[in-house]
Image (cartoon, rainbow, N blue to C red):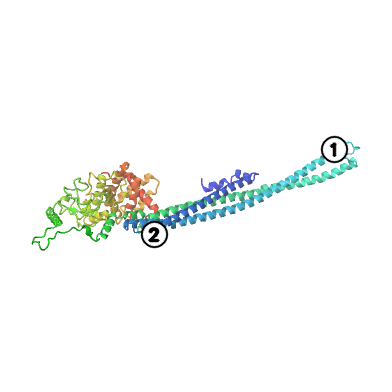
């Protein structure tokens, strides 16, 4: 029912009749009192919540300030990226105090406004009640006087009748007057009583008419308007309360996860911790400590008197170094061995066999040396060139092998590093994930090592054929989640670094406007039309990605990744260079969600 229809209800004849009835005043007074009591309870709640929120944000800021100060002053704690990033995360609590303070101030203003409203309405209610009650008392008093005059008139009429019908020679009422004299006196009194009765009856009728026609409708209308004014004012206060609560949540969320790309989010701060770098810096900082003299061995020295001229003994480590150098010289003569930094220290294998496009050879392994751990794989790859390395037979390079892959348009990349109108790096990432990562929990939601991703990205940009390194160190018998997370993050990095979104700047507004509709048939038809308008590279790459995401969803019992979760992640990635407002974010996600839902209808299947 519309507001206009609801307002018309109060103009119905049944309501108007009630407004002039004897019980209207009391009923409306009770209703207004209920509104006042409701407002009073809400005001108490708002005041209490303001006190709790004020104390909460104040204590939160106090604890955060003290913790940051104590950590900076303590020499017993680490001094590395972990502590620095944690300090930045705790700083968010200090910033949230500003957001919370404005919320507390708004609640206090709301309390003051409601309290003032209740005080004003209560005073007006009291005035209306007293005035209306006085009019009703005046009318009731006039009716009582008229009733008393009526009783006196009827008594005198009865006495006159007795005098007229009694014995004329008999004295009545213990009076010395004759019957005629008594009759004359009674007649005069009856006439006077009759006149008084008529006057008071007319007066009470006039007052009752004024009460019904003037005073009661006026006071009933005042009470009705006062009730509506009170209730509407409380509605406005509740709308303010809802707005302030939404603002608090939005500002808190934006504080922790800023929409601006130049402001780090809490999640980004946490992901910028580099444990390996921290440990390396710590070791290098403390590596030049003085030698422990107690552990220096004593060298044998013959007394000069008994010493003979002899060749000094070769130290043990010198022999070991010589043997190591010989082994390295022998191994360098084998042209089919490729060496680069890999997953674990001291591991050494050969990259043998051929790796065809779109497939991962389980026998392929990488000769690795360096440092790392099982949870954070380091990709210190050197450049691989199939032209000089028979073991990496793949698509023949077209153009300059040093042409960058990331940050270039899809159409340009496909010209020198693409197959079936899809960039090689995209196909490789999809193949690795579908071969080893479909059942890994949190795929695409959990980020890989930032250092590993940057190294692998730089390696591919230096020579596009290094896309073969993606997943090259995955052991089929012992797949590490970190390797797959790194591949997934690299794939997202490729799309987010495109100079133009995958869905193109030209058609971006149409995609957004399409999913705003509530007509599912229209959405499917329109998306089908828009997808076929995309350039070939964007179309086939989007097709490969959407079918891949649906294959990920097919394994959601293991990876816990629903279509909704994937669309939330991939929406901003595929439309990366435009508005990042909360509304656009939801529509971007819906675009991906709808494309996944109707993929078989709008894309050509394999």
Q: Is residue 37 left or right of residue 62?
A: right
Q: Quadrant for the C terminus, please.
A: top left
Q: How many marks?
A: 2
Residue reaching furthest left? Answer: 309
| Number of the label disc, if any, that sits on residue 162 | 1
| Number of the label disc, if any, that sits on residue 317 | none
Q: Quadrant of residue 279?
A: bottom left
Give how far across and how far down residue 216 sits, in percent: 65, 48
Return the residue nearer the eye: 438 or 63.
63
Q: Is residue 143 left or right of residue 58?
A: right
Q: Quadrant of residue 269?
A: bottom left
Which is closer to the viewer, label 1 or label 2?
A: 2
> Dot 2 corresponds to which residue?
69
Q: Is residue 499 above or below residue 30?
A: below
- Ranked by sequence position, the earlier of labels 1 and 2 is 2
Q: Local crowd at mark 1 within 10 Å, few (<14), some, or many (≥20)?
A: few
Q: Is residue 299 above or below residue 374?
A: below
Give how far across and how far down residue 453 sits, in percent: 27, 54
Q: Quadrant of residue 316?
A: bottom left
Label 1 SS: helix
Q: CA distance from mark 1 to mark 2?
A: 111 Å
Return the residue nearer the eye: 58 or 416.
58
Q: Residue placed at 82% from the left, 39% from the top?
A: 158
Residue reaching furthest front? Answer: 305
Return the residue nearer the eye: 412 or 222.
222
Return the residue nearer the eye: 261 or 148.
261
Q: Is residue 356 left or right of residue 248?
A: left
Give how far across and how far down residue 477 sits, in percent: 22, 43
Instruction: State whether residue 204 appears in this view.
Output: no
């Amino acid at each position: 029912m519309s507001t206009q229809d609801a307002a018309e209800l109060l103009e119905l004849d049944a309501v108007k009749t009630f407004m002039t009835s004897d019980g209207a005043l009391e009923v409306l007074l009770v209703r207004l009192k209920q509104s006042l009591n409701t407002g009073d309870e809400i005001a108490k709640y708002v005041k209490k919540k303001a006190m709790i929120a004020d104390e909460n944000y104040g204590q939160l800021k106090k604890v955060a300030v003290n913790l940051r100060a104590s950590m900076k002053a303590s020499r017993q704690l680490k001094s590395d990226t972990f502590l620095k990033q944690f300090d930045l995360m705790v700083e968010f609590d200090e910033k949230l105090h500003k957001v919370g303070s404005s919320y507390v101030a708004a609640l206090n203003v709301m309390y003051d406004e409601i309290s003032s409203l209740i005080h004003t309405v209560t005073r007006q209610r009291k005035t209306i009640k007293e005035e209306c009650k006085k009019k009703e008392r005046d009318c009731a008093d006039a009716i009582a006087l008229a009733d008393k005059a009526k009783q006196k008139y009827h008594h005198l009429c009865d006495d006159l009748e007795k005098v007229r019908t009694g014995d004329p020679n008999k004295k009545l009422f213990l009076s010395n007057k004759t019957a005629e004299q008594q009759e004359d006196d009674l007649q005069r009194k009856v006439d006077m009583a009759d006149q008084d009765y008529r006057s008071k009856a007319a007066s009470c009728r006039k007052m009752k008419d004024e009460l019904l026609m003037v005073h009661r409708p006026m006071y009933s209308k005042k009470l009705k308007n006062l009730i509506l004014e009170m209730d509407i004012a409380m509605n406005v206060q509740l709308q303010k309360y809802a707005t302030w609560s939404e603002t608090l949540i939005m500002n808190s969320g934006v504080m922790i996860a800023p929409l601006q790309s130049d402001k780090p989010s809490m999640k980004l701060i946490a992901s910028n911790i580099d444990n390996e770098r921290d440990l390396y810096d710590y070791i290098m900082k403390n590596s030049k400590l003085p030698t422990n003299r107690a552990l220096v061995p004593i060298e044998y020295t013959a007394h000069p008197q008994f010493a003979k001229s002899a060749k000094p003994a070769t130290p043990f480590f010198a022999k070991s170094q010589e043997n190591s150098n010989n082994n390295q010289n022998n191994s360098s003569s084998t042209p089919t061995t490729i060496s680069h930094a890999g997953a674990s220290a001291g591991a050494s294998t050969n990259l043998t066999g051929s790796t065809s496009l779109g497939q991962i050879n389980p026998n392929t392994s990488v000769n690795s040396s360096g440092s790392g751990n099982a949870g954070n794989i380091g990709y210190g790859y050197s450049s691989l060139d199939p032209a000089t390395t028979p073991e990496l037979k793949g698509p023949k390079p077209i153009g300059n092998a040093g042409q960058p892959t990331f940050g270039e348009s899809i159409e340009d990349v496909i010209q020198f590093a693409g197959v079936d109108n899809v960039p090689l790096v995209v196909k490789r990432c999809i193949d690795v994930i579908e071969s080893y990562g479909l059942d890994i929990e949190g795929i695409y939601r959990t980020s890989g090592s930032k250092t590993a991703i940057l190294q692998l990205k730089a390696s591919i940009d230096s020579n596009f054929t290094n896309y073969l390194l993606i997943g090259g160190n995955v052991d089929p018998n012992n797949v590490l989640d970190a390797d797959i997370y790194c591949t997934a993050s690299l794939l997202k990095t490729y799309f987010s670094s495109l100079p133009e979104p995958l869905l193109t700047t030209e058609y971006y507004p149409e995609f957004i406007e399409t999913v705003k509709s509530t007509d599912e048939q229209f959405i499917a038809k329109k998306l089908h039309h828009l997808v076929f308008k995309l350039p070939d590279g964007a179309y086939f790459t989007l097709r490969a990605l959407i079918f891949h995401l649906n294959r990920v969803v097919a394994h959601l019992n293991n990876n816990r990744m629903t279509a909704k979760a994937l669309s939330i992640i991939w929406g901003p990635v595929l439309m990366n260079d435009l508005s990042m407002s909360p509304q656009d974010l939801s529509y971007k996600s819906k675009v991906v969600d709808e494309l996944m839902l109707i993929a078989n209808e709008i894309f050509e299947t394999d």
